Amino acid sequence: MLKKILFSLILSQSLISACGRQQDSASTLQEAPRSSASVSRLGDGLWMRVPPSSRFQPPSYSFWIDLAVSKGSGSFTEAGVVWTVDDWKTSQTAKAVYEGSLDAGREKWGVDVNLPAQHVNTVEYAAYIKVNGQTIWDVQNNHLIGNFANRDIFLTRTGTKEDASGFWFEGGLKVKNIAPEKQIIVQFQRDQGTVERVAARYVSGNDWTFRIPLTPPRSTELRFKLEYVVAGKTLVDDNDGRLYTYQIGPRPYRQNGNSPRLAGYEIIAFADSNIHEWKKFTATINGKPVTTQGLSVFIDTALLYPETSVQLKIEAEDVKGFRTEQVYPFEVSYQVKALGSFGTQEFRWPRQLNIQNDVLFIADYQEAALFKYSSAEQKLDRQAISRPLQDIAPYGSGNTATLSGLENPTLDLYNAAGELVQSQRIPADMIELPVQLEASSTSLYVLSYYENSIAVFDHNGQYQRKFTLPYTVKGFRVSGQEIWVLAYDNQGFESSNQYFEVLDLEGHSLRKLNFIQQTAKDEFGYAQDFAVSEDYIVILQNYQFVVLDRKTGRYLTKWTGITPRYADESSQQVEGAISSTAMSVAIQGNTLYVADFGYHRVSRFELSL
């Protein structure tokens, strides 16, 4: 909408200048003097103000914009930008502030905006100034900041459409405004036929659109690439050499997941591309009939085992004769079942989880209490702790170590009866800002948030040594004789290169597991926490957890809770939901536990074939 308004403003100003004044009586038309005021972009950027941390808060972003302002001779009142992070579905205005002088009488004005905690890919903005009560826009408006800012052309949307003129494949794209004169060409093939070309049409701002005519009732495979001709050169987007490929016909979409895997009770719906009634719609998996209703397919994957790979085949025909026969391959995954939750009344801020001998240990930060949940008895016991808890680590025969407090942190040791037997302050020169505690059969390990180092203590709480790791550490777990470290490369928490570095108990590297590269990349954002068992790796993210095979790193399944962004005790309680502030995960056997700040509870899940 904003881009249409900008275009309308420019158009209306042109019409006013052309038609809004009476013709001069002289034979020569006199052009009204133009304003010398202008605004242009100097620079911009997007940065992570607060990194993601399972111990503190979700990540927060900011962006900055520097503008060059020429006020001209008029009455200057304001400079700023109008910006969006959702492709102009919504937009906001941010006023700029004066930051200094530039050359040729220009001034530098700056905009700094703190975004709410969210994952941000791209900010788009338009700059303006107000002079003599009128708004003057940057002639190079609709700038991009973020992931797509360095791309000259990229696809934003696709779909099929039918109107009075025919049946079409329609696409939207954005281009960088390199020069005023530009042309976008789409080269395409239908069913591997002749290569054809169609020109894209300008919409507004950086946005263009194109249409490729289709011929029903035949099903069509469409392949295409984009060419951006500007400033004497041709820039190509060919989907990294693979071409953009679409099967035109009924298109499936998962109602409980987007990856090509089946887990649990699946509903797969098919979009009606032709916008007609369907005369026939049937589905089979590996040749066996599957229940359908309307354009939805219902699959109980428990009935598919021991199959690990299946093919869903659909046959459809609409009332106009559009016929489709297509096959969709799926991998069969594990299932996750929500078993309920506990502690909603007892907990305030359940922070960290750990398991030993069928007992789940739960650290509650605000209540300064340690809870023990017996899975066999389904019983929850509370033990008061003298200071707010950061983390817990059961060790030995019923003993428990706790990490308490951010200021003047202490390592506290309790015996099986819950009695405090040792308390040792952890000075900053020993380890700065300790945030996570783990235990092995012989030692206690404490992670430093600032140093990417792990300090080692014995079971009596005596400091032994520490080792510093050459990468960014998000968290770690001790599993048997191994230390699993969730690591990021040196680009920090938003790096796409997340991996596990597996160490021995002395801190020496044993192996590296690139789980992002070995699994579907779109399954992972930043990790809040993780847990390791004999068979599985569980990675906790906002709203969901992902389960991998421990030995190979192969993706098995995930659970996604549908819940408000910031949940609290007044939020709608959804069966098995995980809020955006879920903090810790633990696993024993096939039972998973998630500590949830937002819902003040611990939720249980069962993993099964």
Image (cartoon, grey):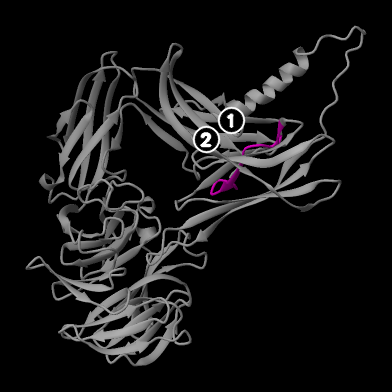
Residue position marked by numbered label 1 in the rendering = 3
Is 591 in the magenta?
A: no
Residue 248 vs 44, above or below: the answer is above
Three-letter amino acid code at disc 2? Answer: Trp
Please indicate, yes or no, whether residue 553 appears anywhere in the rendered image.
no
**Residue 175 vs residue 410: left or right?**
right
Dot 2 crowding, Cα within 10 Å, few <14, some 14–19, many 20+: some
The answer to which of 265 and 210 lies nearer the viewer is 265
Where does residue 433 sit, x and y in percent of width and height? Answer: 44, 77
The residue range painted magenta reads: 135-150
- Disc number placed over residue 88 in the picture, else none: 2
Q: Quadrant of the N terminus?
A: top right
**Residue 509 vs residue 132: left or right?**
left
Q: Residue 553, located in which quarter of the rendered image?
A: bottom left
Q: Gap between marks 1 and 2, in whole Å?
A: 8 Å
Please indicate, yes or no, whether residue 162 appears anywhere in the rendered image.
yes
Where does residue 329 sit, x and y in percent of width and height? Answer: 26, 42
Residue at the spot x=45%, y=76% of the render? Answer: 452
The answer to which of 329 and 386 lies nearer the viewer is 386
Instruction: Specify the farthest residue to the left.
Output: 377
